[in-house]
Amino acid sequence: MPRYTQDSRERVRDAVDFEELVGARTELRKAGVRRLQGLCPFHDERTPSFGIDPVEKLYHCFGCGAGGDVFSFVMETEGLDFGGALESLADRYGVELEREAEDPAMAARRERTDRLRALLERTAAYYVRVLWESPEAEAARSYLVGRGLEEATLREFRVGFSPSAYDRVLTASSRAGYSDAELLACGLASQRRDGRGLIDRFRGRIMFPLCDERGRVLGFGARALRPDDRPKYLNSSDNEIFHNGRIVYGSDLARASAARAGRLVLVEGYTDVIALRQAGVPEVVCSMGTALTDQQVDALRRLAPTVLFCQDPDTAGQEAVKRGTTAVRALNNRTQGRGLDFRIVRLPAGKDPADVVQHDGADAMRSLLDRAVPLARFEVEMALENGGTSTDGRDQALEAAAAAIRPLPPSVLREELVQLVAGRLGLSENLVGSALLTGRRPLADTSSPSSSPTNGARAVLDRREQTERAFLAYCLALPDEGESRLAAADLDELFSAPETRRAAEYLRGRLRSPAGELPAGDEPLARLVAELVIRAGQLEATPAKLELEALQLDLHNLDRRIATARTEGHERIHDLAAERQQVLDAIRHRLS
């Protein structure tokens, strides 16, 4: 990732409309002169504990501890590193970035990557022209129209067609100055079987560009038209640009809609994505018919907290759910409450989403999405449907259903599922409850992000660190008094917690613009500064209250020095105790 100048970073920060940026993820309401609050976009909650300062462009959640600046927010919500977040915001707000001096090797790598991406982009544009202008693509156009897909929507996804001739892309790319090595590197060419030269990798196929979340073409998915062409779907092979296991098809177009809707619709085919978007369901993406990888599940989580997985209710559909949920459960365990609410949409037998839209209409598809059920309910229903009426069959159904219910915490859903199993199998609820007690219960729920244990950010801070943070928040709320206090303080002596000492060192001289010079990539500092700024915005601060916090800090400092003196057998304990009493008297006087 290239390094950009500090001035570039600050121009991007200045250009961002932070209220708009965060408001795309959660509804914000005014909660003070310089504070907006809403439900946290990073964990499930019903009472708002998330706030932003739209002027300083900082955010903090008092529930899960998430916090930081504009770059942290994009890194967290879109899964980018700092450089990627900076580039994404620069693109979004029209800021030109200036690079710092690069070493020759890094500059060469960047130039190579830029060339390969440009080659993929121009090839995608070429395939689009062929689809709509070439007589050879008539069968492809007929197929797509027969699926109910309109030209405007297909152009939005840049769907194209690759000619059947073996060298069209090769020839055009060579004329544009690209080498055989570059065509091989980005997956547009293959070696001939006899090893003598190259041929176009994609020939006579409908072409679906596979893009990253910023809409940059990284590779292609190609569908055959003739029955004898194998495989039916041919994707780009993994290379230095393209990694199949990281791509979620349609994420670039679905991102804004998913943020507003708070959900994603996950389908299995490219044309399903296009059909649903055309039908007015724009928050749709595609897993490309494979088992979800950890990277794809992470990408889904960055787009929305809830995913509706569309599947056929037949055996193959049930297997698709099993393939899809393994990585989801792993994510929910790993992220401790910030995972995915994964729900199942049961389609009519033998129909994919594009079929439903084409034959039953968009309203029918939306109705199916609205009836999506939690994963645990789907698994229980499948267990009951697959169990027989014999005693052995009912025992197997009970065991399978109990396995789906057991990880759930006490909840309305758990109670409903117990009642469902008891009613369908003709058993008592006590017997179903006994079945749930068998087997080892997981330490944490693996299916619901809202039931996982809270993360370490909620751990209670010790009293001294609480006082240190409160003091810094008051300094931010009263920058004139705060600046003089921080300027005169011995920070090493006054602050015992390393994090708050670092924050105090950073804030000294910056209380009026605390976000302006946050060092790139220092997320712990950005998170703490954000918390302090949001806390300051909640305070009814006065100089007297700041003085009281300073006295509390002095009291903790003296307690620490007295404890050290006792350990070392120091003779000044009496003097320190007298000084402590004076501070206590001052505190009592101000509280009286």
Image (tube, rainbow, N blue to C red):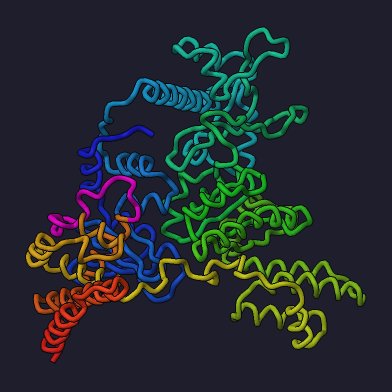
User: In the image, what residue occupies the spot 27% across and 65% down?
Assistant: 496
Q: In x, y percent, where is residue 140? A: 63, 30
On-image quarter of the N terminus? top left
Q: How many marks?
A: 0
Q: Residue 173: image x %, image y %?
A: 49, 15
Residue closest to the eye, 379 or 505: 505
Residue lying at the far bottom of the rendered structure: 592
Q: Main secondary structure of the magenta part?
A: loop
Task: Answer left or right for 47 relative to 272.
Answer: left
Task: Tell me where residue 563 sits by quadrant.
Answer: bottom left
Q: Is residue 435 above or below residue 237?
A: below
Q: Is residue 280 visible?
A: no
**Identity of the residue furthest to the top in this view:** 196
Residue 560 percent coordinates (x, y)? 27, 73
Residue 20 in picture, x, y percent from top left: 29, 56
In the image, is residue 464 above or below residue 229?
A: below
Q: Residue at x 59, y 49 (%)?
A: 294
The reply to whether the magenta stretch includes residue 509 is yes
Q: Quarter of the image containing the C terminus? A: bottom left
Tell whether position 389 is magenta.
Answer: no
Q: Say whether residue 419 is left or right of residue 152.
A: right
Q: Where is 586 relative to 342, above or below?
A: below
Image point (40%, 44%), residue name: 81
Return the residue nearer the eye: 362 or 461. 461
Q: Is 107 or 385 nearer to us in this picture? A: 107
517 sits left or right of 310 in the view = left
**Front-most of 197 and 79?**
79
Magenta segment boundaries in residue numbering: 506-524
Q: Name the residue rendered at 38%, 41% in the picture.
A: 84
Q: Is residue 124 visible?
A: yes
